């Protein structure tokens, strides 16, 4: 009886694995086709990903960059550029700079995204390095925002 259960379990596992491979082969083919249709060819960034991971990575790429997103593409690319500059990653800097420009960002907006990110990093380093208490920081920040909001209303 025990041997039968193990054999049945093994057969189920093999059947499931073969079924998943068939479905995965179809998903891989579909993802590759969509990638080629989107970019006009199959870029290296997807070529270097193991085939079985391509459908998931393509879905992730689409979710992160799709038209359903709340952040407009130009601003999303400026944010991505700011992050890329902080990593730093030459590939990402190039990609997101050109993508931001492609979506209408000006040279000044590109430069500002990088400078703004550097300021965030610099002040983060200063406040973290000096061990400022987070709860005190939050209280102080709320006080600053209340004051600046009142000042903006006067203008």
Image (cartoon, grey):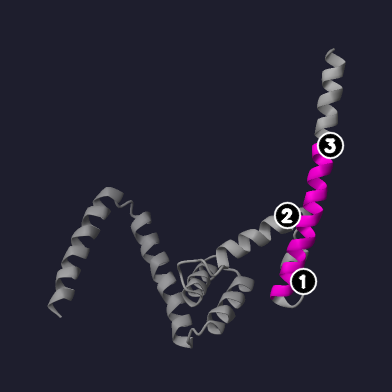
Q: In this orientation, does residue 136 appear?
A: yes
Which quadrant is home to the N terminus?
top right
The CA distance from mark 1 to mark 2 is 15 Å
Count residues near mark 2 (Cα–Cα under 10 Å), then give few for <14, some for 14-19, many for 20+.
few
Furthest-bottom residue in this view:
107
Q: Earlier in the sequence, mark 3 or mark 1?
A: 3
Q: Name which residue lies at 83% across and 21% down.
A: 6
Q: In the image, residue 64 lies at what x, y percent?
A: 56, 63
Q: CA distance from mark 3 to mark 1?
A: 32 Å
Side of 44 relative to 15 (left or right):
left
Q: Quadrant of residue 39?
A: bottom right
Disc assigned to residue 53 = 2
- Measuring from the top left, give residue 7's x and y in whole percent: 87, 23
Q: Regarding mark 3 in the picture, which secondary structure is present there?
A: helix
The magenta stretch is: 15-38
Number of marks in picture: 3
Residue 129, compared with residue 112, is above or below; it is above
Q: N-terminal of the two: label 1 or label 2?
A: 1
The residue nearer to you, when weighing 122 against 71, is: 71
The quarter holding residue 34 reads bottom right
Q: Which residue is mark 1?
A: 42
Residue 120, placed above or below residue 4 = below
Image location (x, y in percent) of residue 78: 49, 75
Is residue 50 visible in the rendered structure shown here? no
Q: Is residue 105 above or below residue 153?
A: below
Q: Residues within 10 Å of mark 1 (few under 14, many from 20)?
A: some
Q: Residue at x 76, y 65 (%)?
A: 32
**What residue would you read off at disc 3?**
15
């Amino acid at each position: 009886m025990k041997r039968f259960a193990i054999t049945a379990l093994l057969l189920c596992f093999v059947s499931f694995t073969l079924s998943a491979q068939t479905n995965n082969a179809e998903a891989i083919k579909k993802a590759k086709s969509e990638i080629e249709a989107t970019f006009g060819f199959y870029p290296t960034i997807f070529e270097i990903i193991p085939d079985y991971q391509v459908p998931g990575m393509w879905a992730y790429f689409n979710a992160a960059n799709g038209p359903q997103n709340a952040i407009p593409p130009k601003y999303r690319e400026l944010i991505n550029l700011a992050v890329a500059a902080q990593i730093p990653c030459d590939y990402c800097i190039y990609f997101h700079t050109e993508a931001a420009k492609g979506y209408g960002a000006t040279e000044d907006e590109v430069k500002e995204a990088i400078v703004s990110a550097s300021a965030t990093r610099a002040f983060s380093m200063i406040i973290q390095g000096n061990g400022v208490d987070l709860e005190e920081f939050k209280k102080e920040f709320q006080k600053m925002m209340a004051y600046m909001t009142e000042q903006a209303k006067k203008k």
